[in-house]
Image (tube, grey):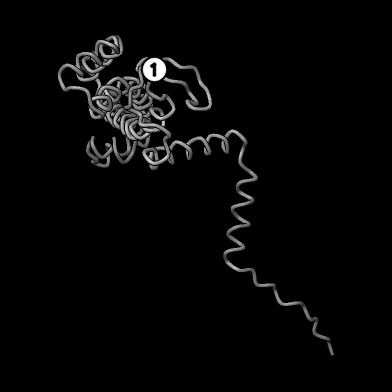
Amino acid sequence: MMELLEFPAPRHVPLVSRIKGDVGRALRCLAPSVVIGSLILLFWIACALLGDRVVPYDPYAEDFLAMLAPPDAAHWFGTDQLGRDVFSRIVVGSRDILLVAPLATLGGVAGGTIVGLVLGYFDGLTDAIGARLLDTLMAFPFIVLVTMTLVALGPSNLTVILVIAVAYTPLVARTVRAAVREQRERDYVSAARLGGESAFAIMVLEI
C-alpha cells in the first residue's frame, strides 16, 4: 500500500504584502534615470498643486530694495529686476507649464498626424500643395509667428498652446507623411481597397 506523502499547505500571503513585493521588485528593475526623472516630475506636479501654499514669498510682490539679489538663505534662487523672489515665481509658474506643455504637444501631434495621413495617402495636387504649405510653415520664423498671434489673440495660455501646436504640427506631419507614403503601397492596403473600404477607413483603421 502506497503511503501518501504529506506536503505543507501553501502559506497564505496577504494581498497588501504581495502588492508591496511586486511594486518593490518593479522599482528595483527601473533604471536610475527613470527614478530620478519620475521624482522630478512628481516634484513639479506637487508644486503645481500646492504652489500657492508652500511658496515663501508672494511671487508678484515687488521689493525695490532687493533687486537682482544673489541666491541666499532668504531667496534660494535670488530675485529678479523688480525684487521678486525667483523661486516663488518658478513654483507658481509650474502650474501653467504643466498645463501648456501637454496640451500643446497633444495638439501638435494630433494636428500633424491628421495632416500627415491625408497628404501621405492622397497623391497628386493635394500632396503637392500640402507639402509646400508645410515647408512654408517650417521656414516661417517662430518669433514672428508668436508676435503675430499675441497681437491678434492677446497673451494667454490658450495663445501659447496654439502657437506651439501650430509650430510643432509641420514636424509631425512630415514624419507621418513619409511613413504613410511607404505603407500605402503595401499589400494589406491594396487588399483593403479591393475590399471596398473607404479612404477614411483605410487611413484610420489600416494605416
193 left or right of 59 in image = left
Dot 1: within a 10 Å radius of its alpha carbon, few (fewer than 14), some, or many (20 or more) residues?
Answer: few
Q: Residue furthest bottom?
A: 1
Vertical comparison of 15 with 81: above or below? below
Q: Give whichever of 16, 120 is nearer the camera.
A: 16
Count of all numbered marks drawn on residues in the image: 1
Q: Quadrant of the C terminus?
A: top left
Q: Give the structural element (helix, strand or loop) at label 1.
A: helix
Q: Which residue is mark 1?
A: 65
Q: Residue furthest left?
A: 152
Q: Give whichever of 72, 173 is nearer the camera.
A: 72
160 left or right of 69 in image = left
88 left or right of 71 in image = left
Vertical comparison of 34 with 175: above or below? below
x and y, in percent, of residue 95 in the image? 35, 35
Q: Residue furthest front?
A: 65
x and y, in percent, of residue 66 in the image? 41, 18
Residue plotted at (30% across, 19% down): 167
Vertical comparison of 42 with 119: above or below? below
What's under tag 1, amino acid-wise?
A: Leu
